[in-house]
Image (cartoon, rainbow, N blue to C red):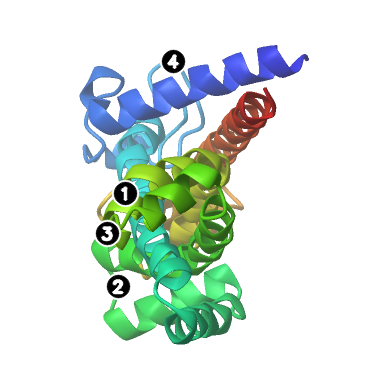
Amino acid sequence: MTARAAAAVALAVLVVAVLAAVAPSVLAGSPDRIDPGAALHGPSAVHVFGTDWLGRDVYARVVYGTRASLLVGVGGTVLATLVGTGWGLVAALGGRVTDQLAMRTADVLLSFPTLLLALLMVAALGPGRWNMTIAVTVALAPGFARLVRIRAHLVRRFAYVRAATDLGRPTWQVALVHIVPNVLLPLMGVVVPNIGVAIIVGASLSFLGLGPDSATPEWGSMLAQSRDYLSVAWAPAVFPALAVTATVLSISVAGRALGTRVDDGRSR
């Protein structure tokens, strides 16, 4: 498969994922309808992905679980981008002491594996979707801050940026007008793949029981709840896992394509 074909497939998967997150009722029926007589049935014409131990349709729960998973993945990454951008700009423009303090703080946080740092944050804040989003933000923001700082230091050397500074323009104006636009575009090539990382972190936290309420469809919690039934029904575990895998791989391919396009644009 060529890179262009892979990107097209990835885009198609992501379009379906976004539709499932925004309007799940278009793609599936109720995820909460219980049918004890159909519990743990395999895939069929009636239940495409089979049913779980309560007779709930796995396909519907996978579709409705997309919203919770993407909310943590996309929401946490967007917040981390905003926090990391501000963090990196303060470090780059705030003077030596501020730079050292900001970057040493980032170094301490970066010394923790992403999942472990998110786990510690949720353990401190308590379980729940919003606390998971905050945890993902804290786990990803230091890496973005370091990248923004490096890029901001490079942009500050550009002749037109130095000219704006020499003309007495306020630091905040120079940052917003000249530095931020030159920082964000290269950053996007890193941000997009990290959405996949955030989805995996969110699913892992939910798998450990630190996510939304167990009644709420979410891929990680669906995997955790299906463990006790693997010997008699594989579908409730396999399809949520495939949803995570397909989404993360599609985001990775899309991020790689975006990074290549950004690099090509900068080299012209």
Q: CA distance from mark 3 to mark 1?
A: 10 Å
Farthest residue toward the front? Answer: 167
> For the residues marked 3 and 4, what is the alpha-carbon distance in whole angstroms?
65 Å
Depth check, mark 3 against mark 4: the one in front is 3
Residue under the point 42% across and 21% down:
15
Residue highlighted by disc 2: 127
Image point (50%, 26%), residue name? 43
Task: Identify the disc placed on residue 142.
Answer: none
Mark 2 or 3 closer to N-term? Answer: 2
Q: Secondary structure at mark 2?
A: loop
Left or right: where 15 falls relative to 245: left
Residue marked by disc 1? 176
| Amino acid at circle 4 | Ala
Q: Amino acid at mark 2?
A: Pro
Q: Position of residue 216 (x, y in %)?
A: 26, 51
Residue 170 marker = 3
The Cα atoms of the two marked residues, 4 and 2, are separated by: 37 Å
Residue 201 spot, x, y in % from top left = 50, 60
Q: In the rendered view, would you say 106 is above or below 174?
A: below
Please say if the residues under marks 3 and 4 sit with CB atoms less than 8 Å apart. no
Mark 3 vs mark 1: in front = 3
Residue 264, compared with residue 113, is above or below; it is above
Q: Amino acid at mark 1?
A: Leu
For disc 2, the neighbor class at 10 Å (few under 14, some 14 to 19, many from 20) is some
Real-space CA distance between mark 2 and mark 1, rounded to the nearest whole angstrom: 36 Å
Q: Is residue 214 left or right of residue 162?
A: left
Marks 4 and 1 sit apart, C-alpha to C-alpha, by 56 Å
The percent position of residue 177, horizontal first and vertical second, equals: 33, 43
Q: Considering depth in this image, is 39 or 111 the residue closer to the camera?
A: 111
Q: Label 4, on which residue?
A: 45
Task: Judge depth for marks 2 and 3 and give the one in front.
Answer: 3
